[in-house]
Image (cartoon, helix red, strand yellow):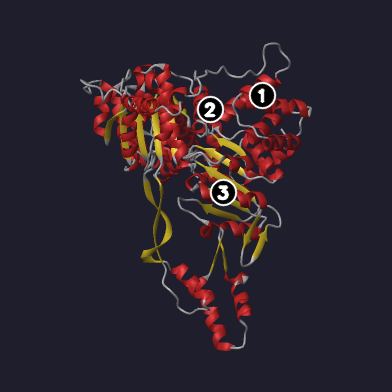
Amino acid sequence: MDDRVGELTRRLRATGYLADDDLATVLFLALEMGRPLLLEGEPGTGKTALAEAVAEALDLPLIRLQCYEGIDATQALYDWDFPRQILHLRALEAVSAEQSVEEAEKGLYDERFLLARPVLAALQQSPAVLLVDEIDRADDEFEAFLLEVLSTWGVTIPEFGTVKAAEPPVVVLTSNRTRELHDALKRRCLYHWIDHPDLAREVAIVASRAPEVAETLARQVVEVVQQLRTIDDLQKPPGVAETLDWARALHRLGAVELDLDTAAVTLGALVKYREDTDKVDEAIRRMLG
Amino acid sequence: MSVDVLLGFTRALRAAGVPVTQDRAQSYLAAVACLGAGTSAGTRAAGRATLCSSPEDLARHDLVFDAWFAADEPGRRATRPATRRTPLDLAEDTEAGEPGEAAALRASASATEVLRHRDIADLTPAERQRLARLFGGLPVRLPRRSTARHVSHRRGQIDASRTLRASLRHLGEPARIHRRRAGTRPRRVVLLLDVSGSMSGYADALLRLAHRLTAATGSTTGVETFTLGTRVTHLTRAMRTRDPEQALLAAGDTVPDWSGGTRLGETLRAFMDRWGRRGMARGAVVLIVSDGWERGDPAQLREQMARLHRLAHRVIWVNPHRGKPGYEPVQGGIRAVLPHVDDFLAGHTLATYTDLLGVIADA
């Protein structure tokens, strides 16, 4: 494909993130067109890791906003530092009595009393990478407010004025699809669905993320995990994050090859549901036995 | 590649059911220009990134893409998927509109009362039409839950930032102490409607009930609707259509498996894996409307219901046959689920739907 896409893939690879052509192309488009990138996919497929890799590859600061139910503007955008404002007022009173009320008030809404939360920080520090993680956990109201920031790249603070980004930050939104996002927000974004990687890519990911793990072990681990993903009644099929955890756990126990006993005792790194443990245990026995 | 061909593609994609808007089409053109319009891979990547917003959209995009950009082979054109229209007559209600006739009105009122208690599956098409109009009058109230966000209130814990802000207004003099308490918001309601053959008499009424609930909430997180048949279909988008008749038509277009078989356990598992576990069922009021005819393995159904029960705030099972005389819950499916259900209700008449809405509201 495009040379510039290839260049981007190489820079991501240098940070240890292996992106396939589709992902690199979408990311390239997002950077080129100045649009936010909406990533969806199974948990543990590297959505958050991509934002970290982009920040590192482009040598930009990463600012992360973790969404949760009930998050609002004072936690995402800005807040005034009330205690300091009051201290400031008291100090003014003590020093000079002749200052007018307006002046004192003006002095209160100064930049030094402004607490920049992630979104404002990203706008102020831009160029930067803003990661809005698990946007599906936040409420609709928050989405609407984010939409405003993402379309104007600016925030209006009534007492202070408008803060505009010198250049739009790179914005990566991730979602686990626990609920449908609003269409208006989706329309602003470029969309990409991240799938589980294929065998060769996952082996390469383990080699790049956990280079200490022996090559044979890495390959065996990935083969087992890829097999497990095809069992269709698992509550939570293991993601790449679990593959890495498991490989590292086995390595810590001194394994250079996968065997039944070590596999059985380290299963906790791979499977997080009691119902799955038995099925996975049985499947591994079948595969290795 | 000319702009016309690309725009034609966006229209074909819209016809195939992907909601392509004007601004999306614009971004598409910009993205294609960005990647160089010459390459097929670039055009495909641009379309996937700008025109799609869900995995389903991606699959449709690729199908239409192949059909549209495959050279002008005869017979390989993107066609609109065959749709099934729910037959509906929108004729005016002449019976209740007659003015001045008190006796006729009274007759109509009592006919309405009778209709409220008639089994929906046994109604004639004309009676169904009259019943459809009554759905608008069902009282809907959503259950509420408390949130992390606070609202100001006379009593409760002290709201430090509001108190300080108020005192700041008086140049730092201590002012009234403000208080706050946890706010509330509607709890999510998830409807799982069985649309298999044995439930076909109730499908229309159930969709109207779902539409009534969806329309009453306004918020986008309020009510989610799914149909269970041989597969799970997410119907919420269709149910958001304001007009009930249009919403039912949209539902008819969306659901591929009307009056098919039921594999309740399997479809329930598909729902849990794809939506439920990720958060849609968590803390929600889940309403399952089904007669419990299970062709698959009751053990699987039991396991999935147990899973659902652990996640959901309240599980309500509505069985249209329950209100009928002589009904015993003997089907394997129903016996499997009863231990994992909080409420087991009837659902064969409009009157039972009113009771049902009351149970949902108080959940």
Q: Position of residue B241 (x, y in %)?
A: 53, 33
Q: Residue at x 52, y 82 (%)?
A: A90
Badge 3 sits on which subunit?
A: A
Q: Secondary structure at mark 3?
A: helix
Residue A108 to residue B12: above or below: below
Q: How many marks?
A: 3
In the displayed structure image, the side of residue A189 where residue B354 appears, left or right: left
Q: Residue at x 77, y 27 (%)?
A: B4
Q: Secondary structure at mark 2?
A: helix
Kindly indicate whether the residues beneath marks 3 and 2 are on one polypeptide chain.
no
Q: Are marks 3 and 2 in contact (CB under 8 Å)?
A: no
Amino acid marked by disc 1: Ala
Amino acid marked by disc 3: Ala
Look at the image and tell me in which quarter the N terminus of chain B lies: top right
Measure the C-alpha gap from mark 3 to mark 1.
30 Å
The crowd level at tag 1 (other Cα within 10 Å; few <14, some 14-19, many 20+) is many
Kindly indicate whether the residues beneath marks 3 and 1 are on one polypeptide chain.
no
In the displayed structure image, the side of residue A193 where residue B335 appears, left or right: left
Badge 2 sits on which subunit?
A: B
Measure the C-alpha gap from mark 3 to mark 2.
27 Å
Q: Residue at x 70, y 11 (%)?
A: B74
Q: Could you tell which of marks 1 and 2 lies nearer the N-terminus? A: 1
Q: Write down the residue under mark 3.
A: A144
Q: Write down the residue under mark 2.
A: B246
Q: Are marks 1 and 2 in contact (CB under 8 Å)?
A: no
Badge 1 sits on which subunit?
A: B
Residue B12: assigned label: 1
From the viewer's side, name the closer residue of B290 and A58: B290
Q: Position of residue B329 (x, y in %)?
A: 23, 23
Query: Which of the two marks, 3 or 2, is nearer to us in this view?
Result: 2
Judged from this view, the residue extending furthest toward the front is B100
